Image (spheres, helix red, strand yellow):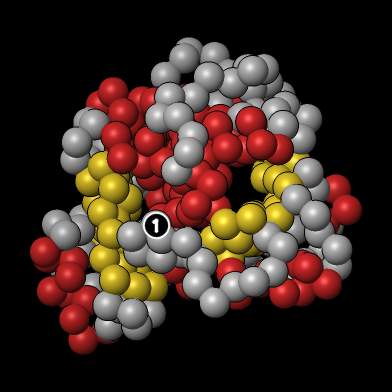
Amino acid sequence: MPASDPTPADLLARALRRSPATPLVTYYDDAAGERVELSATTLANWVAKTANLLQEEFDVAPGRTVVVALPVHWQTAAVLLAVWSCGATVLDTAAEDEGGLEDADVVLAAQARLAPLEEQGVEDLLGLSLHPLGMGMSGYAGPARDFALEVRAHGDVFAPWSPPRPADPGLVAGGLELSLSGLVEAAGELADRLGIVEGDRLLVDTRAAAEAGPVAWLLAPLAAGASVVLVNAADLPGLARRAASERVTATLGQRVDGIRELGRDD
């Protein structure tokens, strides 16, 4: 990682250099019986394709704002890192209403959230099915473009037309605003405070992650050199077995006997 003014894109690049083939983001949805695992190489590929889509189709670049109306998910990780790779600002509405859209240059939203956005007349709108295999939306006939279908046509290597400017806004979420370099600084400080270390494998409950925000569930592990296991609708009786099979070393938002829980002193 560069010695001065790094941005979130640098954190992903460091993860790719450190361990390109080992799991970096694993996602479980226990309600749907889904499991998706991404190495650093695979995540970087998704990020590059998404960044190329945003840059080439929507002119996303430094100074632009992208609304991300998505739950905590592996595809959300790719979208966030892609926006930051373009040098743009993420307006995070994961746990909020659909406010602030007048400032957005493009909106990426889960399929279930498209209808109210369409009612507001949002034009540059990408819908995500959040399908475990990255397939497109089904049963949808509205005006939003289908992220899964659009992203496939874009390249596996991303080069920004205008390099990210570290001092530019990187995240606006509620009353919080952080620059691109401030995101990295906050992620490093949080990782230190929570005791996340290189090689950690973090089991993260998606409800806790949504409340904590992307600095906690995505960037802090990246900054520390850790990997994450995101669990939605966790099957509590099977959680200890899940933690053992995934070689989890710490948890956030769930307690598993014998494994340290981040954010707790007892």
Seen at 72% across and 63% down, the residue is 143
Residue 174 in view in this figure: yes
Q: Nearer the viewer, residue 265 or 48?
A: 48
Residue 115: x and y, percent?
72, 74
Q: Residue furthest front?
A: 141
Left or right: 18 as drawn, with respect to 97: left
Q: Is residue 151 above or below residue 213?
A: above
Residue 56: x and y, percent?
64, 31
Which quarter of the rendering shows the N terminus? Answer: top left
Residue 110: x and y, percent?
58, 66
Count of numbered marks: 1
Q: Name the quadrant containing residue 247.
A: bottom left
Q: Nearer the viewer, residue 233 or 59?
A: 59
Q: Is residue 118 above or below residue 51?
A: below
Q: Secondary structure at mark 1?
A: loop
Seen at 57% across and 57% down, the residue is 146
Residue 169 in view in this figure: no
Residue that badge 1 annotates: 134
Seen at 64% across and 31% down, the residue is 55
Q: Name the quadrant containing residue 18.
A: top left
Q: Residue furthest top?
A: 3
Seen at 27% across and 83% down, the residue is 236
Residue 11: x and y, percent?
43, 30
Q: Is residue 121 above or below residue 149?
A: below
Which quarter of the rendering shows the C terminus? Answer: bottom left
Left or right: 172 as drawn, with respect to 244: right
Few, some or many residues within 10 Å of mark 1 (<14, 14–19, 20+): some
Q: Amino acid at mark 1?
A: Gly
Left or right: 205 as drawn, with respect to 255: right
